[in-house]
Image (tube, helix red, strand yellow):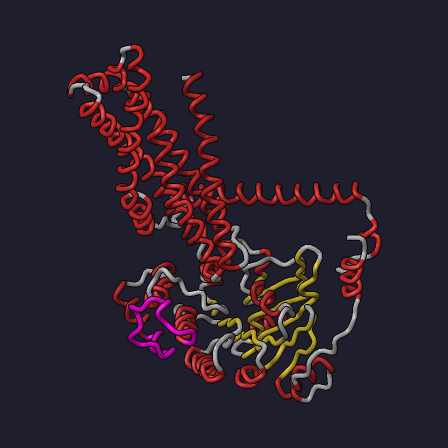
Amino acid sequence: MEADKAAEYIIEVENLMVAYDERVVLDGVDLQVRRGENMVILGGSGCGKSTLLRHIIGLERPEAGRIKIRGRDITVMREEEFSEILTKVGVVFQSSALFNSMTVGDNVALPLREHTRLEDSTIKIMTKIKLEMVGLSGFENHMPSELSGGMRKRAAFARAISMDPEILFCDEPSAGLDPIVGAELDQLIIKLKKALRMTIVVVTHEMESMYAIADRVLMLHEGQVMFYGTVDEFKSSDNERVRQFIERRPEAIQQDESGRYVRALTTDSF
Amino acid sequence: MMPDKSVQRRGFFARFLGGCGRWGLGLVENVYFTYQLILQSMYWTFIAPVTGKGLRVGSSFEEMVKVGVNAVPIVCLISFSMGMILAMQSAYQLEQFGATIFTADLVAVAQTRELGPLMTAIIVAGRSGSGIAAEIGTMKVGEEIDALRSMGFHPIKFLVVPKLIALAIMVPCLTVIADFVGIAGGFGMAVFSLDLGFSRYLNPTIFALVFKDMITGLIKSFVFALLVGLTGCYMGFKVEGGAEGVGRRTTQSVVVSIFLIILADSFFTAVFYFLW
C-alpha cells in the first residue's frame, strides 16, 4: 500500500509551514500531484503560490512540513542527492531567467554540457530539436536580449526540457505577455506535455490559463488552501473566495487591526 | 503579525535594546554569510575538483582575460605615471642633501613593496570588483541564480570560484607588470630631466632591490585579489530589489574593497617590517 502511494504521487507536500520573520506565508499546505497530471496552483498576488513552488524545487527550506519528490523527502536530503533529482526537473521562471551572457543555444545546451558526457555534435542536434519543439528553430545564435518577451519564455521552456524532465514547473507562464502570446504558451505547455509525457505544475493567477491546462487545481489564499480538487469541482464550488475569484469581484475595503495601527502611528505624538 | 498596543508604549530603553538586538542579529547573519562564502569557495576550489566534481577551467580562463589581460593598459598607464611622480617627489627632497642619486633606490623599493601592489589592487577593485558585484547582482535580480540552482548547479562553483581563481592568478601578474612599468617611469623621468645617467640610475636600482621586496609585494597583491573578489561576490549575492539594489551594492563593493585593501596593507606592511 505504502509503495503504491509512492508510485502514484510524484510530488507530495505535507503540512508545509513557511514564515519570514514573524509573517506566516504558508500555513499547513497539503498537495499531492499524480504522475502525468496537470496541476495548477492558483491564487491572487501574495497568497504564497510562488513561495510554494520555490520550496517544491528546493530553492528554500521550510520551517516545518515535508516535501517528497518521487517518494523521497527533499527537505532532509543531502545536496548531491538533491541535484540528481533536479536533473529530472525542469523549471520555467517568471522572468524567463535566461543567462544573458550566453546565446540562446548555449542556454539550452548548458544542462546537457554539464550533466551529461554527450559529444558536442550530439548536444548541438539535441539543442536544435528542443528549440524546434518550442518554435524557435534558427535562433541558436541570438542573445536573449534580442528576443521578445514571448520568445524568451519559449527559450526558457526549451532550456527547461533540455534534459527530458519528468516534472515541469512553470511560474506564471503568461505574466507580462499579451493574451494571444499567453494563450500560445498555454498551448505550448499542453503540446510539450503530450510529446514528453511529463507531470506539469503551473503557478498562475489567470483563469483562462488554468482552464486550458489544469486537471486539478490547488487554490491558495493568505497561505492556506482555499480549494483543492478537479476543475469541474472548482467551477461548481460555492466557496466564497472561489466564487469571488471566478467572478472577478474586488475585495470590499474594510478597516482592520493594521488600519488602526497606521492611524495610531500617523496621529499620535510621532 | 498585528502589533499590540504594548509595543507602542514601550519606553526608550526597551526600543534601544530592541535596536541593539536587531543590529546584533543582522551582524551575526552577515558574518555567517561571509564565513559560508569563504568556506564554500575553498571547498569548490580545492576539494571538489579532487573528488571529481569538476572545476570550470574554461570560464576561469575567460575571467582571467577579463580581469587580467584587459586591465594591462590601464595598469601600465597608472604605474608609469606613479613611477614618474615618485621620482620627482623623492628627487625634490633628496636634492637638499645632494643625494639625488638615491632616487633610483627609493623608486624601486617603494614601487615593488608598496605602490605596485596597492595601485594594481585599487584599479582591479574599481574595474573588476564592481563588475563582479554588478554581474552577480543582476543575475540574482533576474532569477538567473535560482535558475542555476534549479538545474542542479552550485552558484559558488559556477560564478564565484572562476572569478576568485582568475583574480588570485592575474592580480599578482599585473603587479609584476606594474612594478616594471613603474620603475621604467621613474627611470624615464630621472634620465631625461633629473640629470641622472643611464647606468647611474639602473645600477642602484638593481642593487637596491632584494628578492624580499618583490615577494612581500606579491604576497600582498595575492591577499588583495582575494579581498576584491570576495567583496564583489558578497555584495552581488546581497543584492535585493531590482536595479537600484544592484547600483547600491556595486558602489559599496568598491568602497568596502578599497577599505579592506588599505586595512590589509597596513597589517601586512607592519608584519613584514617588524617580523621579517
User: Which residue extends farthest top?
Assistant: B97
Residue visible at 37% across and 47% down? Answer: B162
| Residue B210 percent across, percent down from the top left | 28, 19
Please indicate whether residue A78 sits to the left or right of residue B229 in the image.
Answer: right
| Residue A260 percent across, percent down from the top left | 80, 64
Magenta stretch: residue A149 in it?
yes
A156 or A123, which lies in front?
A156
Please indicate whether residue B10 sits to the left or right of residue B108 in the image.
Answer: right
Question: Is residue A91 visible from the viewing direction of this image?
Answer: no
Q: Quadrant of the C terminus of chain B?
A: top left
Residue visible at 32% across and 75% down? Answer: A129
The quadrant in which residue B207 appears is: top left
B99 or A180, which lies in front?
B99
Counting every numbered tag in the picture gives 0
Residue A197's place in the image compared with B103, above or below, is: below
The quadrant in which residue A223 appears is: bottom right
A139 or B23, which lies in front?
B23
User: Which residue extends farthest left?
Assistant: B198
Q: Quadrant of the N terminus of chain B?
A: bottom right
| Residue A249 percent across, percent down from the top left | 68, 83
Please indicate whether residue A16 sits to the left or right of residue B50 in the image.
Answer: right
The magenta region covers: A129-150
Question: Is residue B176 visible from the viewing direction of this image?
Answer: yes
| Residue B51 percent across, percent down from the top left | 40, 46
Residue visible at 30% across and 28% down? Answer: B85
Residue visible at 52% across and 78% down? Answer: A36
Residue B14's place in the image compared with A261, above or below, is: above
Magenta stretch: residue A83 in it?
no
A32 or A250, which lies in front?
A250
Please indicate whether residue B89 sits to the left or right of residue A5 in the image.
Answer: left
